[in-house]
Image (tube, rainbow, N blue to C red):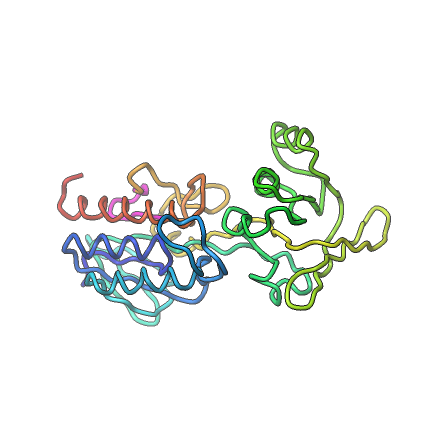
């Protein structure tokens, strides 16, 4: 029996574990490799205060800190959570019981299916413009996507000095204000096109693009391709609990990271928050831990 069980070993889950343990709660955090924390795939972190290095380095430091604080670490994929009396049962290879839970399962950036996408991950292929954009200042980059995420990434990359080209598989699907901003900034856009493959020796050097309207291939020199085709939140395990999710599958939380189910809190990229970054995930995790502590002390 645990006071708090945290599902997720990314920055939100590990911050929750640190804070819960420091509150004196009997705490466990579960980690798995499906989905792997997006932080572990970041080759370089430069926007987390006080730290510069790889994502896996930062993740390991957080994990060490959580264990040092007294949190227990279990590697098990939790697939379902059910209510049993006043407590929660987390079901993986084994069953675990807790008085409160924090969901910090994150999500997985959708892959675009580009040939070479996996090979060049961290070497020119990125799923996070705000994480890796600064590495490509004054260089030519492609943003691959059709929606709000792609346009926002393109504007950000343009603003920090990248030479940006948007390649969209369909007509742009975003609010008019964003589309107008793209036009004003003079960001070039290729519509109804697919990036078939990326090429290079050690890093991305070019992208081969198929123009569907013209039925022809073109090759464009570039230093990076930012894939922005969406994120799939890992939240199916809360369905049976009746936790509310939005139309995209993100868990709905309030300012205290509470869900609609008493005793269930959520933090990080699995939530319907506006910014999905390491620093905001850590903030969510700290707030969720405090809310869980108050819940267990029956202060809220």
Taking the view exactly as shown, the residue that stands out farthest to the bottom is 93
Instruction: Pick the residue in front: 93 or 297.
Output: 297
Which image quarter holds the C terminus? top left
Q: Based on the picture, tell me whether residue 109 belongs to the magenta stretch.
A: no
Q: Is residue 195 left or right of residue 135?
A: right
Q: Is residue 28 left or right of residue 157?
A: left
Q: Residue at x 33, y 58 (%)?
A: 7
Q: Based on the picture, tell me whether residue 262 belongs to the magenta stretch.
A: yes
Q: In which image quadrant can residue 20 be found?
A: bottom left
Q: Is residue 7 left or right of residue 247?
A: left
Q: Position of residue 99 (x, y in %)?
A: 20, 55
Write down the region rendered in magenta: 258-267
SS assignment for the magenta stretch, majority? loop
Q: Position of residue 228 (x, y in %)?
A: 59, 48
Q: Position of residue 174 (x, y in %)?
A: 62, 35
* Count of marks overlaid on the render: 0
Instruction: Pick the residue in front: 246 or 34.
Output: 34
Which image quarter holds the N terminus? bottom left
Q: Residue at x 28, y 65 (%)?
A: 64
Q: Is residue 72 left or right of residue 191?
A: left
């Amino acid at each position: 029996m645990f006071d708090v069980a945290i599902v997720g070993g990314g920055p939100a889950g590990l911050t929750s574990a640190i804070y819960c343990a420091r509150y004196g709660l009997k705490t466990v955090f579960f980690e798995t490799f499906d989905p792997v924390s997006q932080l572990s795939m970041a080759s370089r972190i430069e926007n987390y205060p006080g730290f510069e290095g790889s994502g896996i380095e930062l993740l390991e430091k957080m994990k060490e800190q959580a264990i040092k604080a007294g949190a227990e670490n279990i590697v098990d994929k939790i697939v379902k959570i059910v209510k049993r009396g006043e407590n929660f049962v987390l079901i993986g290879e084994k069953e675990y019981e807790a008085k409160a839970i924090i969901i910090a399962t994150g999500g997985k950036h959708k892959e675009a299916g580009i040939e070479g996408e996996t090979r060049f991950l961290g070497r020119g292929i990125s799923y996070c413009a705000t994480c890796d954009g600064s590495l490509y200042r004054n260089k030519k980059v492609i943003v691959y996507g059709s929606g709000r995420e792609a346009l926002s990434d393109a504007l950000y990359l343009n603003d920090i000095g990248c030479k940006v080209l948007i390649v969209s598989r369909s007509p742009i699907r975003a609010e008019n204000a964003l589309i107008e901003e793209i036009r004003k900034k003079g960001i070039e856009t290729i519509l109804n096109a697919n990036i078939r493959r990326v090429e290079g020796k050690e890093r991305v050097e070019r992208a081969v693009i198929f123009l569907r309207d013209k039925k022809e291939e073109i090759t464009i020199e570039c230093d990076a391709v930012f894939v922005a085709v969406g994120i799939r939140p890992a939240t199916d395990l809360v369905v049976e609990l009746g936790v509310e999710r939005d139309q995209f599958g993100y868990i709905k939380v309030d300012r205290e990271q509470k869900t609609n189910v008493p005793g269930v809190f959520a933090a990080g990229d699995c939530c319907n928050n506006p910014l999905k970054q390491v620093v905001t995930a850590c903030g969510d995790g700290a707030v969720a831990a405090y809310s869980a502590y108050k819940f267990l002390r029956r202060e809220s």
